[in-house]
Amino acid sequence: MPFKFAILAGDGIGPEVTAEAVNILRVVAELGGHDFQFTQHLVGGVAIKSAGTPLPTATLDAALESDGVLMGAVGGNEFNALPPDKRPEAGLLQIRQALGGFANLRPAFAFKALGENSPLRADVIKDVDILFVRELLGGLYFGEPRAWNKDTHSAWNTMRYTRDEVIRVARVAFELARTRKKKVTSVDKANVLEVSQLWRAAVTEVAAEYPDVTLEHQLVDSCAMLLMSVPRHFDVVVTENLFGDILSDETGVISGSLGMLPSATIGGAVNLYEPVHGSAPDIAGTGKANPLGAILTAAMMLRYSAKLDQEAAAIEAAVNQVLDAGYRTADILRGNQPGQQLVTTKEMGLHVHSALTHLIDTRQSMHGV
Ligand code: IPM
Ligand code: MG
C-alpha cells in the first residue's frame, strides 16, 4: 500500500532540514520495499510571498488527502510587523486546526552522547525520557473572545476548555503511559483558574478508566521547577496548550539543543509532524542547521502514521550511532570535548543515511539466517 506524505518545508532552515528527513525516508522505502510518495507544498512566509496567504487552499487540500504531513518551520524577520492573523505562524495554526489533531506529542530525552551539552548536570539528566502531550487546539490560542482594542488600550484572550476536549487529550496521555512507565502528570493552575479546575476534574475522571496508570496533578509553576531539578521524576506529562508550549521548550534544555527534538500531532483526520525548533532565519542557507530534529520527526511519522515501528526505531538508533561517533552540527558541538567532528546539515544527513543503511542491512541479513 502506498503512503502519501505531504512535505511542507516552509521558511528559513525548514527546506534544508526537511530535505534530509525526506532522504532518510527514501532510504527506508528503498531498503524495506515500501512505496512512499512525496509531494511538496507551500506554507508560511514562502506561501505569503507567492500566493498571498500563509496556508494556500492547494496546500491544505494536499495535506488533507495525504497519509501524513511533514512540516519544516515557518516564520521570518520580514513578517514580524504583520498582525498575528497575517503572519507565517497563522498558516501553522490554521493547518493544525484544519487537520484536527488535538494531541501534540513532544518527547524530551537525554541523548547518551550529548550528556555534557545540557546546562543541567549530567547526573540530573541521565536516562531522562519524558513525553509531553500538549493539547493543541484549545485554550488561549483559539479561545474567543480575543482582541486588542487600540482605543481603550486594552487587550484580552480567553482560556476556554470543555470537559470533552480535556477528556480526549487525557485519554491519549493515559494510553501512551501504558506503553511506557505508567505514570501521568497532569499540569494546571487549579489554585487560581476555573479552567484548570475543570481540567483537573476531567483528567481525574479519565484516570478511573486506567487503574494501572498512576496520576499526579501538579501546578504549572512548581512543575516548571521540578522539570529542571528532577526531570527523571516524569514519564508522560499532559497539559493545556500554552503551558505545553512553554514547558516543552523548557524541557528542550535536557537534550542540549532544540534542534534535536521532534513532535507529532495526532488525533485528527491527518497527523501533522513538525520538529520543535523554529525557522532560524539567521543560519538559513549556511549549512549550520541541525537536521536531526526533522529526521527524528520523520521517524515519528513512520511510527504513528505508517505504523512502521521497527523502521522508526532504526532511524532513532542510527541518529544515536552518528552522535556516538562524534558527528556534530554547530548547535551541538562543544569546544572542550575530544572526538567531535563539525559537520554541515547535508553531511549529518549523509551520516545518518549510512548508519541506517548499515543497520537495516544487518537486520535483514540476520533475518535471512
Ligand atoms: C510551537 C511554536 C508555535 C506554537 C508557534 C510558532 C505558533 O512555538 O510549535 O511550539 O506556539 O505552538
Ligand atoms: Mg513553542
Image (cartoon, helix red, strand yellow):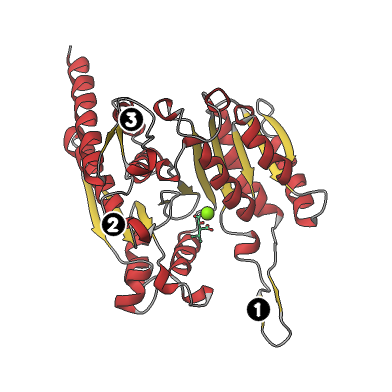
Mark 3 residue element? helix
119 to 324, vertically: above or below = below
Q: Quadrant of the C terminus?
A: top left
The answer to whether mark 2 is within 8 Å of ligand 1 is no
Q: Residue at x 19, y 25 (%)?
A: 358
Tag 3 near tag 2, CB within 8 Å: no
Tag 2 near tag 1, CB within 8 Å: no
User: Total marks drawn?
Assistant: 3
Query: Which mark is on residue 15?
Result: 2
Q: Which residue is mark 1?
A: 148
The type of residue carrying mark 3 is Leu
Place of residue 98 in the rendered image (x, y in percent of width and height, measured from the top left): 47, 64
Q: CA distance from mark 2 to mark 1?
A: 34 Å
22 to 177, vertically: above or below = below
Mark 2 residue element? helix
Q: Nearer the viewer, mark 3 or mark 1?
A: 3
Q: CA distance from mark 3 to mark 2?
A: 22 Å
Query: Which mark is on residue 323?
Result: 3
Q: Nearer the viewer, mark 3 or mark 2?
A: 3
Disc 2: CA contacts within 10 A as few (<14), some (14-19) or many (>=20): many
Place of residue 182 in the rendered image (x, y in percent of width and height, measured from the top left): 61, 27
Q: CA distance from mark 3 to mark 1?
A: 47 Å
Tell me if residue 12 can be seen. Answer: yes
Q: Residue at x 34, y 51 (%)?
A: 67
Place of residue 96 in the rendered image (x, y in percent of width and height, measured from the top left): 48, 60
Q: Which sits in the foreground, 340 or 14?
A: 340
Place of residue 33 in the rendered image (x, y in percent of width and height, measured from the top left): 18, 36
In the displayed structure image, the side of residue 278 where residue 22 appears, left or right: left
The type of residue carrying mark 1 is Trp
Indicate which disc, 3 or 1, sits on the residue closer to the N terminus. 1
321 to 351, vertically: above or below = above
